[in-house]
Amino acid sequence: MIASIQPSLFERMVALRRDLHRHPELSWQEHRTTERLVSELDRLGLSYERPLPTGVIAEIEGPPDVPSVAIRADIDALPIQEETGLAYASEIPGVMHACGHDAHTAMLVGAAELLLSRRDTLSAPVRLIFQPAEELGAGAKSMLEAGALSGVGAIFGGHVDRHYPTGTVVAVKGTVNASTDAFRISIRGQQGHAARPHETVDAVVAGSLIVMAVQTIVSREIDPTHPSVVSIGRFEAGSAPNVIAGTASLAGTIRAQELEVRDHLRRSIARICESVGQLHEADIKLEIEEGTPPLVDRGPMVDVARSAAEAALGPDRVRSVVRGANMGGEDFSWYLQQVPGCYVRLGARLPDSAGYPAHSSRFEIDEEVLASGAAWFAEVAVRGGCALATGDAAEPALGGAR
Ligand code: NI
C-alpha cells in the first residue's frame, strides 16, 4: 500500500465507500448518505452540525484563537444507470456514483480518524465539510451561505482522477477548472405555410444563424491561448415539414478559465442574439444562468498541498503537470473566492487499465486511492493548520464573489 495507514482503517474506508456506492443519491437527496456519515461521526465522537437538509459539517477541536483549516468532500451521485458489473454496483436504478464522490466521502472520514490519532499535535482546529449537490454546481454556495467557512482560514479539497497513477497528487498553481454558465435563447418569429416563407419569420433560420455565429466567438474573438468553450446542446423548433416554425428554443453552456474571457463570451452571445433579432425581425431573448466561477489554485496553500503530498506519499508522488486545460466545472471554486486553499487531483488509475471516463456508466477507480487520499487530507490539514497558526497563509482570498 502506498500510504502507510493501518489495514483496519483501509478496510473501514473500503466498506464505507462500497456502502455509499451501493446506495447513491442525487444532488440534494443525499439523506441516507448524510445519516450514514452522522453515524460515522458519532462513532468517532465528533461534534457536528447539519445546516442544510443534506450534508454535514464536523469539527475536530484544536487550539483556541487559531482559525480552522477545512477539508471538504462532495457526497452526491449522478443520474446514470451503472454498468460496471461490480459486486457492489448501485442498487438504485438510474443513479450511480460515476464521479467518485463516494471515494471522496470515505477518504474524508478516514482522514478524520488519522487526525484524531494526532489530535494533541494539531496547530489548528480541523473542519470536515461533507457537501451535497456538487454535481449541480450549487452545494458549495449553499454551504457558504449557511456559514460553513465561518472561522475558517484555509480550505483543501481533491478529486479522484484516472489519468494519474494511484498514490500521486497533482497540485498546480493556476486555473484547474473552468467557469460554467448555462444559457437559454428563445426566438419568437411568425409561424406560417412552408410554401409561403415571405409571410413568416422563420425561427429555424434565425436559430441556425445564432448557432453558427456563436461558434465564431471562441475561434475568432478569443485569444487561442486562453481556453474557452461555447456549446449549444439543445435546439428545439418546429412541428411539421410544411409549417415554418414561429418559435425556437436553444440552450447551451459557456466555459472559461478567466473572468475576463467569461465576460467576453457572455457579451458576444448577447450581441449575436440582438443582431440576429434585428436581421430577421424576430423577438429574441437571452437568459444566462450564472454557474460556478473558475477554480484557481494560487498562493502559499498550493505549496502546503504539495508538501503534504510529499510527506504523506513520498517526494516522487507529487505531479505538477495537468493534461491540458480542464474545461469541466467544480463548485469548490466558491470556497476559494472566500479563503485561501488548494484543490488537487488524486491519482486513481486502475492498474493495467485506462478505465472509463468519469460521468460514464462504467466509471471505476482504484480503491487504493482511499488510502493515499485519506493520508493526504490528514497531512494537508495538519500542515495547513501550522501555516495558519504561524501566519504563513497571508494570501488574500480572491474576493468579490460573482
Ligand atoms: Ni466530481
Image (spheres, helix red, strand yellow):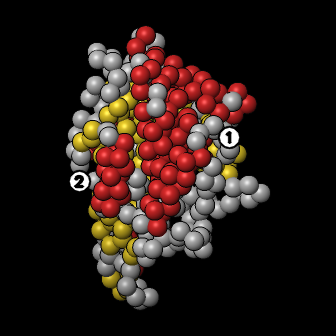
Give the labeled residue for mark 2: 53
Give whichever of discs 1 and 2 has the lower sequence position.
1
Which residue appears at 46% of the width and 56% of the height?
16
Q: Secondary structure at mark 2?
A: loop
Does ligand 1 reach within 8 Å of label 2's beta carbon? no
Q: Is residue 223 left or right of residue 106?
A: right
Amino acid carrying mark 2 in the image: Pro
Give the labeled residue for mark 1: 2
Q: Nearer the viewer, residue 169 or 323?
A: 169
Which residue appears at 28% of the width and 25% of the height?
151
Is residue 106 depicted above or below 250 in this figure? above
Which quarter of the figure has residue 122? Answer: top left
Q: Which mark is residue 238?
A: none
Amino acid carrying mark 1 in the image: Ile
Query: Looking at the figure, which quarter contains the N terminus?
Result: top right
Q: Position of residue 290 (x, y in %)?
A: 34, 47
Is residue 167 depicted above or below 34 in this figure? above
Q: Position of residue 312 (x, y in %)?
A: 61, 31
Residue extending farthest top: 390
Which residue appears at 38% of the width and 21% of the height?
124
Q: Position of residue 13 (x, y in %)?
A: 51, 51
- Residue 271 appears anywhere in the view: no
Q: Secondary structure at mark 1?
A: loop
Task: Decide: few, some or many residues near mark 1? Use Cα within 10 Å; few <14, some 14-19, many ≥20.
Answer: some
Q: Position of residue 323 (x, y in %)?
A: 67, 43
Q: Nearer the viewer, residue 215 or 333?
A: 333
